[in-house]
Image (cartoon, rainbow, N blue to C red):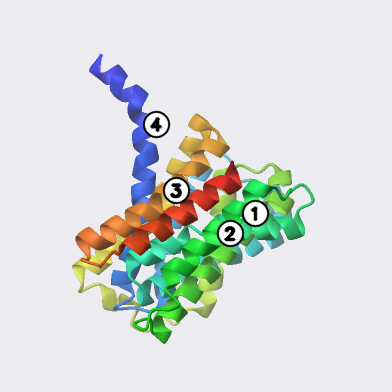
Amino acid sequence: MAFQQLRKQLPLLVFCSLGIIWGSNFLYMKYAAKYISATQIVFLRVVLALIPILIYAWSTKSIKKAHLRYTHHFLVMSLLATVIYYFCFVKGASLLYSGVAGALSGSAPLFTFILGLIFLKEEKCTLNKVFGLILGALGIILLAKPFDAAVTTTTWLGIAYMLAGSLSFGASFIYTKKYISPLKIAGEALVSYQLLGAALILGCITDFKGIMAILPHTEAALGLFIGLSLLGTGLAYLIYYYLIDTFGAIKASSVAYIPPVVALLIGALLAQEPISLSDLLATALILFGVWLLKK
């Protein structure tokens, strides 16, 4: 009886676990950025995450030789949804409080909506969506605190990186809908190609000098290798596929509401980062704006 009850609750537990895993990524990024460069962090994250994803995709026989003809599309996704996106988020997290960085990451759907209006004919502009966009923008402004004298150039740069990463990630959804989805390729195969392409690109542009400087720092090393790579990327993707199979794509995508809140809480509780009422209000505005866009 207890086992059956646990089995029924498993999808919900996994759903919440994914939100917590993704929400904690920003603290791991901040710790790792103290010892190695952003490109080194992204390279290690991608390479370590690629291993379980490839094993899973191979075991499901999702990887096919015929997919090679779409390599150009996979490389674009490697740039938009991995290289640029991950790099900008690492840079942003290193310059901001991890909680604020996590809250700003919730703005990606706002950029997806704007780009969708420009590039997708089927994307309709409704009053609800415009209101959601305005609320999300207000949340971003409130987090940025433009009229606060304590805000430095470093803070603005961190915000710019987070918004650039969100823009890149948002653009990847548009590219996926327009060019990738019609190919009808399994999700685990797509992510395998995406991460493999990213690993190759990063292998060409990363300066590997001092990349192992993180090893003596146990907290940062474990955060990067286990938290950010194996759990936050490799396992997270596999869990996401499970949620899509269980709940459907629309319901599964709502897990994106959890990480910004988790990032704020983890930053405050574990890193003793200050959280103001305006930070909480700003995060709520962004998430409510995103909810209106998806409604």
Mark 2 is surrounded, within 10 Å at the Cα level, by few (under 14), some (14 to 19) or many (20 or more) other residues, namely some
Residue 195 is situated, as x and y percent measured from the top left of the image, at: 53, 59
Q: Quadrant of the N terminus?
A: top left
Decide: marks 1, 2 in contact (CB < 8 A)? Answer: yes
Instruction: Give the residue number, with chain letter if any, for mark 2.
Output: 134
Q: Amino acid at mark 2?
A: Ile
Q: Residue, x 20% and y 66% (percent of image)?
A: 272
- Circle 3 residue: 257
The disc placed on residue 130 is: 1
Looking at the image, residue 276 sits to the left or right of residue 71; the answer is left
Q: Which residue lies under the disc numbered 4?
A: 11
Q: Secondary structure at mark 3?
A: helix
- Left or right for 70, reference 60: right
Tell which tag, 3 or 2, sits nearer the viewer. Answer: 2
Side (left or right) of 174 relative to 163: right
Residue type at the position of mark 1:
Val
Look at discs 2 and 4 and give the one toward the viewer.
2
Cα distance in 3D space between marks 1 and 4: 33 Å
Foreground of the two, 286 or 165: 286
The amino acid sitting under disc 3 is Tyr
Whole-angstrom CA distance, mark 1 to mark 2, is 6 Å
- 285 or 238: nearer the viewer: 285
What residue is rendered at 34% in x and 35% in y? 13
Mark earlier in primary sequence (4, 3): 4
Estimate the spatial distance between the alpha carbons at disc 3 and disc 2, rounded to whole Å: 18 Å
Nearer mark to the viewer, of 4 and 3: 3
* Up/down of 14 relative to 202, above or below: above
Crowding at mark 3 (Cα within 10 Å: few <14, some 14-19, many 20+): many
Q: Is residue 289 left or right of residue 21?
A: right
Is residue 140 at least partly visible in the picture? yes
Disc 4 to disc 3, C-alpha distance: 17 Å
First reached walking from the N terminus: tag 3 or tag 2: 2
